[in-house]
Image (cartoon, grey):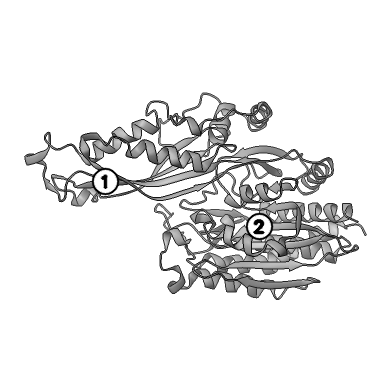
Amino acid sequence: MTLRTNDAGTAIHEIWEHDVVPQLVDYVRIPALSPAFDADWEAHGHLEAAVQQVVAWIETRDVSGLTCSVQRLDGRTPLIVVEVEPFGHSSTNNTVVLYGHIDKQPEMEGWRDDLGPWTPVIEDGRLYGRGGADDGYAAFASLTAIEAVQKNGGCHARCLLLIEASEESGSPDLPAHVDALAETLGDVDLVLCLDSGCLTYETLWLTTSLRGLAGVDLRVDILTEGVHSGSASGIVPSSFRIVRQLLDRVEDSETGAVLLPSATVEIPGHRVVEAKGVAAELGDTALDDLPLVDGAQIVPSSIAEALIENTWRASLSVVGADGLPPTARAGNVLRPYTTLKLSLRVPPTGNSAAVLRELEETLVANPPYGARVTVERPESADGWNAPALEPWLADALERASQSAFDRPMCLFGEGGTIPFMGMLGEKFPDAQFVITGVLGPESNAHGPNEFLDLAYAEKLTNCLATVLDTHGSRST
């Protein structure tokens, strides 16, 4: 059996236009915040609503050998598990894992007046709203690719689609779910993940590395209650100044370099070459979509260096704060405490647990002025560095890109984290990985005006179908 690529493309277009897009519009309306941003997620029921919507759609699809269930573990978010038996060739023990998630980031401020996180709007081929691109489309695209393969002369190995609901919280529930699925997973030799990004919308972009993550809430207490700044400033140190001193232990404020030895790794030479190739492909305008204020400049001196900084070097961000009143309500008070939420991106081959330990120890050691320094809500997730592509997969991806985009495939490292990839890479060291996604220029995942480029997502689905069929044919 040979996949009729043109017919599959037509089928995918029809499914996207008539079935997937309306589903994504409804999905955007669901405020399915990840547990880190909604402690009462179970009571609110939004994650469950997203689960039920996706499951209901899956159960309507005419896919041979499909079974769909929701795995539930006490105290954890649910996991959608879709199993599709091998199609078009004799049974094989190999498993293709397809991955996505349905939980979302919080609303964020700054949306255009006519847009909103839970208000789906289709404009110029883009679906605006939270979660459509990150990562609600993945479940629909994955099953659509499988359906197109079956209906158009193709074949595929056993497929296991896993859609989790805690990825935006660092996937704390996923290890338990994967352990519970140990027998179901079987022998995984191919992983397809649609939760990454692309640097343009003109070709297929394959993610070759992901950074890890180490994070804590850093709290500094110096007073038991606020006091008049005119009475105590200059005598009692500001809690914010103490926080600044502690951050200087972790980061060089002039350069942004992270000072923790555990957060520095040797960058593989072929990744440097890869970054230079991507820079040449993108040109000098590659970062022009960053919403910098007038006159602002980026830190790296070149596009290639920017790509390396964003993918293979550690970086620290302060992503939240407590203890600071809004400026309109801020009196002349020496505040009792300051809390900052720290997010430290770890290089792909770094040990995130070791970085987290060093981060905690560095922050709490010898507190300035005897202040009470505590770190709370520690989290860590390892990054991932892709194994070399086997020839059959490299060929399949190149053919898929040429067919869908009429351009060669491109490789690049990603600055974000997908904990599931590091976990599966460790469990299945011989597996091949296809990590890609739709988070391209201006798509603004996690921020205001997030959008899904519908045409790109459809073309990516075509590429997925080609890879599934090639893998299936190879297993015959």
* Left or right side of 470 for 262: left
Q: Secondary structure at mark 2?
A: strand
Three-letter amino acid code at the position of disc 2 = Tyr
Q: Secondary structure at mark 1?
A: strand
Residue 114 seen in render: no
**Cβ–Cβ under 8 Å for marks 1 and 2:** no
Closer to the chain start, of discs 1 and 2, is 2
Q: What's the residue at 52%, 42% (across, down)?
A: 352
The image quadrant where one finds the N terminus is: bottom right
Q: Which mark is residue 99?
A: 2
Q: Residue 139: where, in percent of width, then height?
A: 65, 62
Q: Residue furthest right?
A: 1
Which residue is denoted by mark 1 in the rendering?
338
Which of the pair 402/397 is nearer the observer? 397
Residue 160: image quadrant is bottom right
Q: Which mark is residue 25?
A: none
Q: Residue 136: where, in percent of width, then height?
A: 59, 61
Q: Residue 149: where, in percent of width, then height?
A: 82, 61
* Left or right side of 120 for 13: right
